[in-house]
């Protein structure tokens, strides 16, 4: 390494093969298969890196990954990194056209694939296809010359147009996130994490693979989240930590969990989407442990604020992690120092991305700015806890007045007849936009629009008045379980 303490790949080998770590379980399948110890993980990652190097993978090269969710796919991601290259995990079951578009947009010409994901890859022009079961044998390898600003991970995220773009993260950023998450959550070798989130998502990798492997924790990799599976998974593995998004936890509320299967939980972690106070309280009541809400963006590697597990505040996204600066900025660009004042959440520090790939037509990397403007509106209290109050692009402008959908959603969620809701703006010839709500009722037989409108009117001022309520069986979601506001807005346009 050129500098001390700048890369996870520099820290992992010495820890994993140390006498105190080598026999400790690192990664195991949830179906009852054998656990991989840290010593064995070091050997397997090094072997994977050696094979990739012999297959022609070069330092700083982008290597896309098309594999089923498995222990082998985790080892492959780490192996690509250990080879000095940059992994780019793809969502499973993408169409041939989607694969072609994503690879071309970021300039990736090499794909590591398993047998289940070969369909369509052979038809992509100029692609170097590496089959994981056919990689050549080679001596183990761990790159020792990775620079802090070298690309360490490329993730796809949807932009404002909905077209995926590549977020390029540095090794410095990956380490910075992990060294903030580990102390903030108290991660140690005594922890066991149940992993049910996608391996192509920043949370599923940075917070649930890279960070625990820096703390010596045990990761149990289950299949992708399905609510009915959770009681058995918790009963079998007795984890100390689980992680999800609000929708995932909401789907668990009607399930029965044995008290002893929850006894080991230190906390449940929640992020990636807003959560109402009511849902927060119901989840804690179900799981009998604190629900720790965090906040972050792929563009800032992953996590920028988090509630301390033993000092969480319901409704807050927590305090800024160490090694990052999180603050509020006014519309004129000045920093907001006073508490209780809304501003745009901004992030500075080593966690910021190197830039986007695939945004411009020629796929040129956009240089990152020194400050990441999140697009989220928030405020801070006297203890340094941040609160999300809305999103700039989601703000509904009604007759010149700015309305935060989140405030209306909080009011609607107080109604016991409401299981879930989302508020968006509907075009209006007179006022420009008016707020309307999509509501999933707790009981489909009880759909009282007037009651929901009355609750909002009682709790909020006149400008927040709901123009209409649409009752639906479910709210549309994207691939990581976030409510898809764009889909709801499109449905309104089609109705018009």
Image: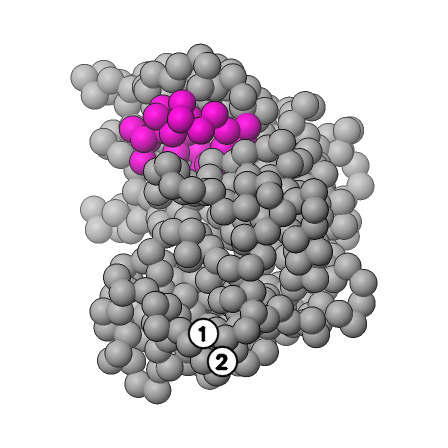
Q: Is residue 88 visible?
A: yes
Instruction: Say left or right for 229 vs 205.
Output: left
Instruction: Say left or right for 50 vs 346.
Output: left
Camera-nearest residue between 48 and 77: 48
Q: Residue 475, percent across and down? A: 30, 37
Camera-nearest residue between 28 and 73: 28
> Which element type, helix, strand or loop, lies under badge 1?
loop
Q: Is residue 379 above or below residue 108?
A: above
Kindly identify the residue that appears in the image at 69 percent across and 23 percent down: 311
By secondary structure, the bulk of the magenta-drawn segment is best described as: helix
Kindly identify the residue that appears in the image at 59 percent across and 78 percent down: 59
Kindly identify the residue that appears in the image at 69 percent across and 71 percent down: 144
**Number of residue marks:** 2
Q: Is there a contact, CB below 8 Å, between mark 1 and mark 2?
A: yes
Q: Residue 233, percent across and down? A: 38, 29
Instruction: Say left or right for 231 vs 245.
Output: left
Quarter of the image holding residue 476?
A: top left
Characterize the local packing of mark 2: few (<14), some (14-19) or many (20 or more) Cα atoms within 10 angstroms. some
Characterize the local packing of mark 1: few (<14), some (14-19) or many (20 or more) Cα atoms within 10 angstroms. few
Q: Which residue is mark 1?
A: 137
Cα distance between the residues tagged 1 and 2: 8 Å
Whether residue 253 appears in magenta in the rendering, the answer is no
Range of the magenta residues? 225-249
Whether residue 239 appears in magenta in the rendering, the answer is yes
Tell me which numbered mark, 1 or 2, is placed earlier along the sequence.
2
Q: Nearer the viewer, mark 1 or mark 2?
A: 1
Camera-nearest residue between 304 and 178: 178
> Which element type, helix, strand or loop, lies under badge 2?
helix
Q: Is residue 282 above or below residue 347?
A: above
Q: Residue 95, percent across and down? A: 25, 66
Q: Which residue is mark 2?
A: 54
């Amino acid at each position: 390494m050129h500098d001390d303490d700048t890369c996870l790949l520099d820290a992992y080998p010495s820890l994993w093969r140390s006498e105190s770590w080598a026999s400790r379980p690192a990664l195991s399948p949830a179906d009852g298969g054998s656990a991989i110890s840290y010593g064995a993980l070091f050997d397997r990652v090094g072997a994977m890196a050696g094979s990739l190097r012999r297959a022609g993978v070069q330092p700083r090269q982008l290597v896309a990954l098309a594999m089923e969710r498995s222990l082998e796919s985790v080892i492959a991601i780490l192996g690509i990194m250990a080879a000095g290259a940059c992994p780019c995990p793809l969502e499973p079951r993408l169409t041939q056209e989607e694969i072609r578009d994503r690879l071309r947009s970021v300039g990736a010409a090499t794909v590591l694939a398993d047998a289940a994901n070969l369909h369509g890859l052979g038809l992509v022009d100029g692609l170097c296809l590496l089959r994981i079961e056919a990689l050549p044998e080679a001596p183990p390898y761990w790159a020792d010359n990775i620079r802090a600003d070298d690309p360490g991970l490329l993730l796809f995220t949807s932009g404002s147009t909905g077209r995926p773009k590549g977020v390029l993260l540095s090794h410095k950023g990956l380490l910075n996130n992990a060294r903030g998450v580990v102390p903030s959550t108290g991660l140690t070798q005594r922890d066991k994490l149940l992993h049910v989130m996608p391996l192509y998502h920043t949370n599923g990798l940075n917070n649930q693979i890279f960070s625990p492997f820096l703390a010596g924790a045990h990761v149990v990799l289950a299949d992708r989240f399905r609510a009915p599976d959770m009681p058995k998974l918790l009963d079998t593995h007795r984890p100390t930590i689980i992680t999800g998004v609000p929708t995932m936890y909401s789907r668990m509320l009607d399930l029965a969990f044995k008290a002893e299967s929850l006894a080991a939980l230190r906390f449940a972690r929640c992020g990636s989407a807003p959560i109402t106070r009511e849902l927060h309280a119901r989840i804690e009541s179900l799981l009998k442990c604190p629900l720790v809400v965090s906040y972050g963006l792929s563009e800032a590697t992953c996590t920028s604020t988090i509630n301390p597990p033993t000092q969480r505040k319901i409704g807050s996204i927590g305090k800024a992690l160490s090694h990052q600066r999180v603050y509020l900025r006014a519309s004129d660009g000045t920093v907001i120092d006073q508490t209780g004042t809304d501003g745009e959440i901004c992030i500075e520090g080593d966690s910021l991305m190197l830039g986007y790939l695939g945004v411009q037509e020629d796929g040129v990397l956009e240089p990152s700015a020194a400050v990441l403007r999140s697009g989220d509106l928030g405020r801070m209290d006297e203890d340094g806890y941040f609160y999300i109050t809305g999103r700039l692009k989601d703000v509904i402008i009604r007759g010149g007045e700015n309305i935060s959908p989140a405030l209306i959603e909080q009011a609607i969620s107080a109604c016991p007849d409401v299981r879930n809701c989302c508020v968006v703006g509907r075009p209006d010839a007179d006022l420009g936009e008016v707020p309307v709500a999509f509501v999933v009722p707790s009981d489909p037989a009880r759909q009282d629009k007037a009651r929901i409108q009355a609750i909002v009117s009682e709790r909020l001022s006149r400008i927040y008045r709901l123009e209409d309520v649409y009752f639906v069986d479910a709210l549309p979601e994207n691939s990581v379980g976030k409510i898809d506001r764009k889909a709801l807005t499109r449905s309104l346009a089609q109705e018009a």
